[in-house]
Image: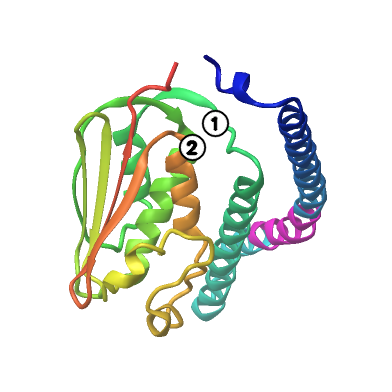
Amino acid sequence: MNSYDTLSREELLLLLKKSEQDKIKYVNKYLEQEEKWNILRLLLAKISHEFKTPLNSIIGFSDLLKYNLKDEKLLDFTNNISTSSKHMLSLIQDLLDLTRAQYKPMELDYKLFNTKEVILEIINSYPNIEMDYTLVDIDIEADIKRFRQLIYNLTSNAVKFNRPSGKIKIITYLDNGFNFEITDSGDGIDESNCSVIFEFFAQANHDIIKRQMGSGIGLALCKSIVEAHNGKISVDSKLGIGSTFKFYLPLEKAR
């Protein structure tokens, strides 16, 4: 016997009314979310134009100046302008991407690519940083732009918090999918902060971060990218010893 068969006419009408109210509530919530997203989309477009356009101009002209300067002091100043502008542009892009991900599922452009080539490209962009690495030579099907962004954010995070005399270690391996681990020998993260380190604007060890250029955005974006690929990301850390950030991605897009 169906559970509805035992209900009276009045009880069925109340149930139907409640069902309709729930449906209206859901539709209103959806419309409210859509309205918020439309407002946010306009704001992001404005931020993108108002902030990124002048920054790109600063980067372009400062890089152009470097080829025409002979004074070493002026060249150092110009390099600082270019580096700081690129860092700010990267932060703005991370913020835009992460804010979008809070309202809409991250759109991914799946392609087959070699993980070792992408990771080596990023490692080689830090010629003055000592890194030990063991990389599996494997192709995966994922969004290469987001994958590059993920590796770059985790690598720059390790470089940022690593001790000057410390070494950074990177390994990749296959274990039910593609696995990436990066270990630094920095100040580490308190165990109580490890569960929130990937949250939007979360910051652990505030006194240490103040000495760096941490924004609390990069790791949250990493989590969004990994989870959009149906993967997992985590951190193991000990105060005074360092941290190991690791993530797992499926080798192929879910069909």
Reply above or below: 72 against 110: below
Residue 62 falls in image quadrant: bottom right
Residue 187 falls in image quadrant: bottom left
Residue 244 shown left or right of residue 34 in the figure: left
Say which element carries label 2: helix
Asked whether 115 or 53 is in front, the reply is 115
Circle 2 crowding by C-alpha within 10 Å: few under 14, some 14–19, many from 20:
some
Say which element carries label 1: loop
Structural distance between the alpha carbons of marks 1 and 2: 8 Å
Q: Is residue 216 visible?
A: yes
- Magenta span: 46-60
Q: How far across and down, in percent of the image, does residue 120 sit?
A: 31, 42
Circle 1 crowding by C-alpha within 10 Å: few under 14, some 14–19, many from 20:
some
Query: Which disc is residue 65 wearing?
Result: none
Residue 110 shown left or right of residue 40 in the figure: left
**Residue for point 56% across, 77% down:** 77
User: Which residue is under mark 2?
Assistant: 228
Q: Amino acid at mark 1?
A: Leu
Asked whether 237 or 79 is in front, the reply is 237
Q: Main secondary structure of the magenta part?
A: helix
Reply above or below: 76 against 244: below
Q: How far across and down, in percent of the image, does residue 121 sit?
A: 36, 43
Asked whether 130 or 104 is in front, the reply is 104
Residue 123 shown left or right of residue 27 in the figure: left
Residue 55 shown left or right of residue 155 in the figure: right
**Residue for point 19% across, 32% down:** 175
User: Which residue is under mark 1?
Assistant: 108
Mark positioned earlier in the residue sequence (1 or 2): 1
**Residue for point 31% across, 52% down:** 234
